[in-house]
Amino acid sequence: MTLSIRKINIRTIIKLSSIVFSLSLFSINEVLCQRDSSSLAQLIKETNDLFIYRYAQGLLLSPYEIQQHHRDRTIKNIEWVNAFDLYKLTSSRKDTIPFIVKNNQTIVQKPDERFNSRTYSYYKDGRIHKIFRGNHLQDLFLNDEDGFLIQHGFGGELKRAKRKDKVFEWYNVKNDRLEFITSYDEADRLSKIKTSGHYFGPGVEYEIEEYSWQGDHLMLKNTIRKYKEGDADTTSIKFTYDNLGLIASISYRNHGQTTWSITHFDTEIQATENKHLKITIANTDKPLLSITFDHYDNVVEMINPYNQQRREIEYRKRKRRN
């Protein structure tokens, strides 16, 4: 009888221990579980984009928009936001930039500064439409009947595209000068940018960047720079990702080299207080990028070796309808 009770107690203890262990895992990973689908994938992609952008700026180009101007890059779930303050801290200065949300398609930066405010006007789907400085139009984004971006800028910086299928030739309107050509694949991912040589100096004829993708992941970027006198130089950058889709390593090879220089990264996704999610990319224990997202997937803190940004967001109690 005593032996039977002991067996029952042992089994009970094991079961209770399993329950406690499961609950502890659940408490640690609660936010991860809640974001286990498309939300987490989108936050990982956003983190990758911000990190990889320095190596491949064409990452944020699509036929429909320049993605860094999309409303979601400023604030997500705008219908729940009244205002927010952006705090920027660098080694030399500290800035506080206030924003107010007038409606679901209008955000005003520094609203109390009459001549230095910025008003961002968006389409309903979040693409940028107009940017004003004070009351003066600073940038106007126009799309053709297929929704493709064919014009942006203002004054001497106005650029207009001549489009054939998914190849866009962008001209400076004032000088009637070809600036660059962008080409996209069948999935609307950037496949090639050809930039005119005047961007790089009098000795350069042109530069071509070629992009290779696997789903949403940029896998390879080749850069070919053609000089007016002499051969072209080619550099290549390869990107690899971990099982969650976060950047795992970047490999670099210069023109004429036969071996790749590889930099490996350590990545971490962790739940923090208030259902926030923190994604960190580091190299040999040195953080290179750390982004914290809140429960509405908005960035509330971003830290890299050069600066720190923090955002305080005033959310609404009721969803704004328009």
Image (cartoon, rainbow, N blue to C red):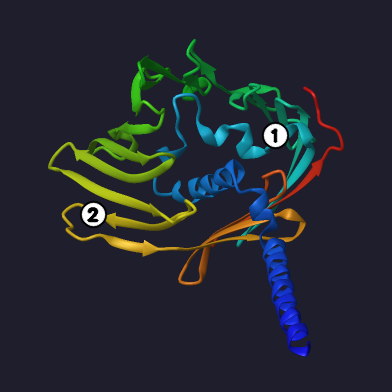
The answer to which image quadrant residue 16 occupies is bottom right
Amino acid of disc 2: Asn
Examine the rendered structure and indicate whether residue 118 appears above or below residue 137: below
Residue 254 is tagged as 2
Tell me the crowding category of disc 2: few under 14, some 14 to 19, or many 20 or more residues within 10 angstroms, Cα based.
some
Could you tell which of marks 1 and 2 lies nearer the N-terminus?
1
Residue denoted by label 1: 116
Numbered label tally? 2
Q: Is residue 229 left or right of residue 74?
A: left
Amino acid of disc 1: Asn
Can you tell which of label 1 and label 2 is closer to the viewer? 2
Q: Is residue 229 left or right of residue 17?
A: left
Which SS class for mark 2? loop
Residue at x 78%, y 87% (from the top left corner): 1
Instruction: Check whether the beta carbons of the residues at disc 1 and disc 2 lie within 8 A of each other.
Output: no
Question: How far, Cα to Cα, is label 1 from label 2?
Answer: 44 Å
Examine the rendered structure and indicate whether residue 216 appears above or below residue 171: below
Residue 250 percent location from the top left of the image? 36, 56
Task: Looking at the picture, tell me which residue is in the foreground, 25 or 303.
Answer: 25
Residue 18 percent location from the top left of the image? 68, 71
Residue 36 is tagged as none
The answer to which image quadrant residue 9 occupies is bottom right
The answer to which image quadrant residue 113 occupies is top right
